[in-house]
Image (cartoon, rainbow, N blue to C red):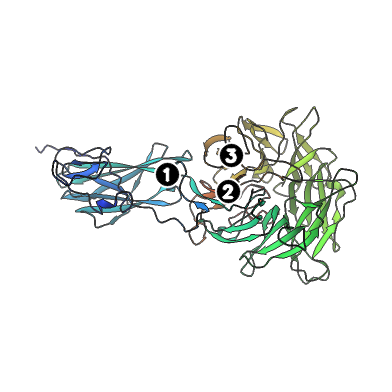
Amino acid sequence: MKSLVKWSALAVAVVVACTVPELGDEPRECADGVEPPCLDGYVCVNDYCVKADAGTSDAGTPPLWLELLPAPASPKGGAEFRYTDPVEPEARHLDRPATVRIRSDLEGLDAGTLTVRVRGTDGRDEPYAQFHPCDAGLFCREVEVPLWSRPLAAFRGTFVVTASILDATGDAGTASLDIPVTRWKWSFDGDAGVIQTSPAIGAGGTVYFGTSGTANNIGKVFSLSPEGTVRWSRAVGQVTTGPAVGAFANGGERVYVGVDAIRVHGAYTKVLMALPGDGGTPSYGCPRDVGDSYATPLALTTTQMSTDTTALETVVTQVELPNASGKNAASLVSFRPDDPGANRCLSLPSTADSPPVFGGMVVHGTNVYATGEPGILGFRFASNAWQSISATRSSRDWEMSGLALSGNGAQVVSVGASFDAGQSALVSSLATDGATSTEFLPARSGPPIRDLVLGGTAGSEIVYFGHDVAGGALTAVRLADMTKLTDAPDASVIPNAPVLGASGMLYTASGPQARGAEVVAWKASSLERLWKSDSVAPVAGWQSSREVYSSPSPALDCARTDGGVARAEQLGTLYVPGNNGVLYAVIVDSRGLDTDAPWPRFQHDARNTGNTATPLTCP
């Protein structure tokens, strides 16, 4: 009876032609005591140079080699981009495959018995059976491992690849290899000031964002590809609101921003801009005096005058106006860049003190709603002009900031704060017909709520929000009766809107706090914390003032091919705007936004249109 001698080896992870180029494509042969010896860090074992800490095979057998082949070259985005994880530079991106080579110089291996398994951070193995021949030894096969197919319950972690094979006599050999994996995709530093507003996603996954400028550099609008290169940038001045991305039509799209353009355009101070998505010459509209301020979020709709042959794309916002009473007022402003005549800029003059709070501007049908102090303001375009809708105005004299619309558009949902001694946070739901309203007071003397999102489905909405305070809770409330469902204590400072992603995920990005910034992934149904980052700067903190504007929220897109096509896997990229002027791209487990949610992110959709008619699918 034949005695089976089991042979095994730990993996030797050789990044060919990168880490140790002297080894070439074959294990370097050696002999103990014979020159030349192995390279530093390698030892001679059974006539082969192996890594000193990699382990060895049983005596008399050559090792079974597992090699992690080099990753594809990073995009050539320039020095402004960082593609490697700052904590684990050798880690592989979760959204990219890793190629592992299995080889040996042992004769008589039975290729039909080769198995390869990959273990994620959940401890479970997944088999892979698609092998490709290679020419790097008597036995050589390669397998492409889709790293995203295994769970990564952390920002970074280690996957284990194990290979096993039998020789002609039935003896078994195994080897294993560790692959460090990260959710870091890239970061971009445009060196053009703080990112005060939320990024937007355009066609093909193009990422648009604006900056404030510095003493030495003018604020810019940037257009980046999803793989991490600059498509174009334009110096525009301090970006105070937007971007919002218009509909893709006739081969292009517009990017709308509100800016303080005095450093760039001598004819304008505060102005709205429409920039072509290809970086062409922008259009300017609705210029204001130096004392005015565009800071309310932009919303996109269409308007049609009696003289128009078709409805025109229109961006709507509020401008803050100085007021002699000492309490600034607001005026509704709309910009129609395709109008060639006198109706290019339409406004509704303010009739009372109603300063904007810079939190929300949303559209449902022909109606527009805006946050203010006090309450919610309503407008409608009819008979060639904007008109106020008095029935939608709340009488509560609180500073309302975040704004969303229910799935059927029947309710305007807002969050806000009061700074009296008794109450300091509020969730309010006001029927758009003015008939009913409900409210939720999280706690007396509790921390303020700045923004919100709506999950669930139409008729069964759930309000999600955080608190703008260190150690604040992340909370879920049922909209129908304002009953608290659950909360997660100590969720960090959340001065902005969370993001509801596909596959039941929720993401938050913290403001400045003593324990460091956190991007956190949560299970939306239970608010269970799944993982958090440690390498992303905080978002700019909230201040409803004329100097610093509402805190920016992250944007979420599907994972993309290098050509910008949305991938089918349950993968996405979360774009986080840092208060250091850096935009961070983080790999997440959601294929874009939760398309069933009524209002899954700031301004509703990836384009930041604030319009319930805009699809929630990846642009």
Looking at the image, residue 570 lies above or below residue 314: above
Gap between marks 1 and 2, in whole Å? 22 Å
Q: Earlier in the sequence, mark 1 or mark 2?
A: 1
- Answer with mark 1 or mark 3, whichever residue precedes in sequence: 1
Which disc number belongs to residue 582?
A: 2
Q: Label 2 near label 1: C-beta < 8 Å? A: no
- Using the image as rendered, state which of residue 382 and residue 552 is in the foreground: 552
Query: For this view, does 435 lie left or right of residue 578?
Result: right
In this rendering, would 60 be left or right of 420? left
Q: Which residue lies under the disc numbered 1?
A: 181
| Left or right, 417 with reference to 158 | right
Pair 1/3: label in front: 1
The image quadrant that residue 271 belongs to is bottom right
Instruction: Bin the neighbour count of mark 1 within 10 Å (Cα to Cα): few under 14, some 14-19, many 20 and up.
Output: many
Q: Give SS at disc 1.
A: strand
Residue 524 is labelled as: 3
Q: Is residue 302 above or below residue 404?
A: below
Q: Residue 479: where, in percent of width, then height?
A: 71, 39
Above-or-below relation of 269 to 343: above
Residue 485, quarter of picture: top right
Q: Of label 3 and label 2, which has the lower sequence position? A: 3
Q: Position of residue 386 (x, y in %)?
A: 84, 58
Q: Quadrant of the N terminus?
A: top left
Amino acid type, label 3: Ala
